[in-house]
Image (cartoon, rainbow, N blue to C red):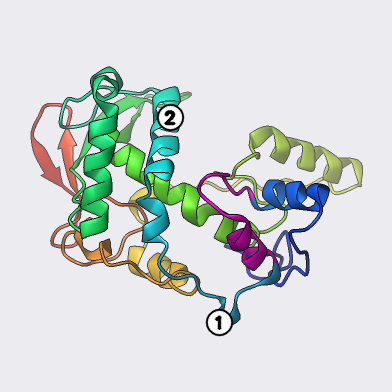
Amino acid sequence: MNREEPSVPVSQPDRVGDKQTEEDLWQRHKAERGVWTKPMLAALARGLKGNKWFSLIDKVSTERTLQLAWEKVRRNAGACGVDGITIGHFEQDSQSRLLAVNEYLNKGTYQPKPVKRVWIEKPGSAENRPLGIPTVTDRVVQAAVRMVIEPIFENRYAKHSYGFRPGRGCKDALRRVEELLTAGRPHVVEVDIKGYFDAIPHDRLMALVREHIDHWRSEDRWTGSGADRGVPQTRRNGRRPISQSNGRTARR
């Protein structure tokens, strides 16, 4: 997160008024209709007093948000997690499953399952790289969380940051590189942090998140031991359990 050069000023003076201005705000902040409301969007645009959001878990757990999250997970397909429940199996009784998730979240008893670890080929290398596969249910909850909190952080990121952001990708980064080369800046520096996602300091990451979002009551259950992490996956004794492809559970 770059605090020096946000892509949109945090205290944006725009108000949700005419249709064009309203549509521009939805697009600019990448807010999902049906998850975010017009008052929330207006508050995001003008800036909150204290710069902190509260009670967002109530937005995550709504039936509408969970339904939209499920639709996204279904479109993305993907393999099953440790519980063996595939997209097809989930779809057969998706409404009852979503209602159960809604109840767990509202009661603060939602507990993610371990992440299944598989190894896939790494392009251009003889090595394999690990891939963690959450259960379909956990992917739905993760998608719901992302839809709720993403707009809060999206307009705080650097203008020329392209990784893992909605509506941005590697082609946008390449176009920016071409612009800079054309402008007479001939040097390109490529940096890769090995095992970055395995080594994220979750306590520091969550401290930054909490500067803008008050933590919700189910967070400790999501982290198992109460240690903070960036995604809702089980963690005990400071290590996240990973179910390996051989069916055994290992700890990192």
Task: Identify which residue is drawn at 41% across, 51% down.
Answer: 145
Viewer-proximal residue, 222 or 218? 218
The three-letter amino acid code for the residue at tag 1 is Gly
The three-letter amino acid code for the residue at tag 2 is Glu
- Label annotation for residue 209: none
Task: Identify which residue is drawn at 32% across, 60% down.
Answer: 229
Task: Please identify the quarter of the rendering in which residue 116 is found.
Answer: top left
Q: Is any atom of residue 218 visible in this view? A: yes
Identify whether 143 is placed above or below 129.
below
Residue 225: image location, x then y, percent: 16, 64
**Does 33 lie within the magenta span?**
yes
Viewer-proximal residue, 86 or 239? 86
- Label annotation for residue 50: 1
Mark positioned earlier in the residue sequence (2 or 1):
1
- State the residue position of label 2: 71
Identify whether 163 is placed above or below 235.
above
What segment carries the magenta color? 30-45
